Image: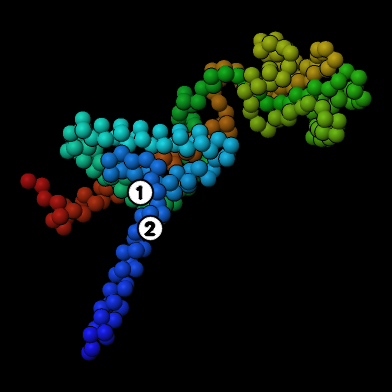
Amino acid sequence: MSGKKIWKYICMSALPALLFACRDEVSYVERPSLASVGDVHLYKDEADIMFAQQHRADSVAFMQNYIERWAIDVLFYEKAKENVIATDEIDKMVDSYRKSLIENLYQDRLITQQLVPNITEDEVLEFYEQQKALFELGEPYIKGFYVKIPDKAPKVRDVRNWCIRKGDEDLEKLEKLCTENKYEYNFFMEEWIPFVDLVRRTPLTKQQLMDRLLSKSTIEFKEGKFTYFVCADSILQKNDTKPVEMVSNEIKELLLNSKKANFIKTVKRSLYDEALKNGTLILH
């Protein structure tokens, strides 16, 4: 091989390495640093990711604030490392957290794959009867409805009759009238609501409204240019026991959590018994 060919061969062989080195150099040059603390850098492309979500009008202020917060965070961490030398204790804490995290993830997987939660209504009722003391009301609740209409509104007499009769057809007509005329109303015949929520809709005090509804289930009164109709289908007083339908979901959640705990307890016990049996666990 001639000298010229040898030189050409050397150049061709070295070209990939030169291109690789140049690529690294270009990459380094194309990634400018906005700030640095020792060997730790905040690169512009990292800040741009956060900046992309900001308005252009405050770009300068945002970038200055971002750099400052980054620097403070790095400086404080470096100072903390200088003053916290109990790394063994930190390692123990990290290991403990990692252990708990792995166990919890495995536990959730077991429950999802193997436990079939099936809380029956009989279980709910049984728990409710045995634990009624847990379900004491801290405030009054009510079922019923509320209507507020202008004094000069048409069909006021019809509204009065519908509210007194409270039949399904009456309530349908009442709701239709309120909807069409954009009257203020709220029907809660099938659900319990805090009594105070109803009080807020009327000009009466809590005690005034309660006293009137306890003496008469459907009341009518005027305030300003409006007439109010309030019906109490059922009332629960403070310290009464919540009805089972109000706490059914809460009981199901309690029972489900109990089943999960018992399931994991059973799994752990079986692991212990199996380890004793096959010699994995040896008690000295």
Residue under the point 27% across and 86% down: 5
Q: Nearer the viewer, residue 44 or 199?
A: 44
Up the image or down, 119 lies above or below 169; here it is below
Q: Does 24 appear above or below 126?
A: below
- Residue 22 image point, x, y percent: 34, 63
Say which quarter of the image contains residue 88.
Answer: top left
How many residues crowd around disc 1 within 10 Å: few (fewer than 14), some, or many (20 or more)? few
- Please provide percent x and percent y for residue 71: 36, 35
Q: Judge from the rendering whether residue 82 lies leftward or rightward of residue 24; answer left or right.
A: left
Q: Position of residue 153 (x, y in %)?
A: 90, 23
Amino acid of disc 2: Ser
Q: Which residue is mark 1?
A: 105
Foreground of the two, 14 or 253:
14
Q: Nearer the viewer, mark 2 or mark 1?
A: 2
Residue named by callout 2: 27
Residue displayed at 85% across by 15% down: 225
Amino acid found under the numbered disc labelled 1: Leu
- In this rendering, would 262 be left or right of 223? left
Question: Residue 244 appears in which quarter of the rendering?
Answer: top right
Decide which of tag 2 and tag 1 comes sooner along the chain. Answer: 2
User: Which mark is drawn over residue 251?
Assistant: none
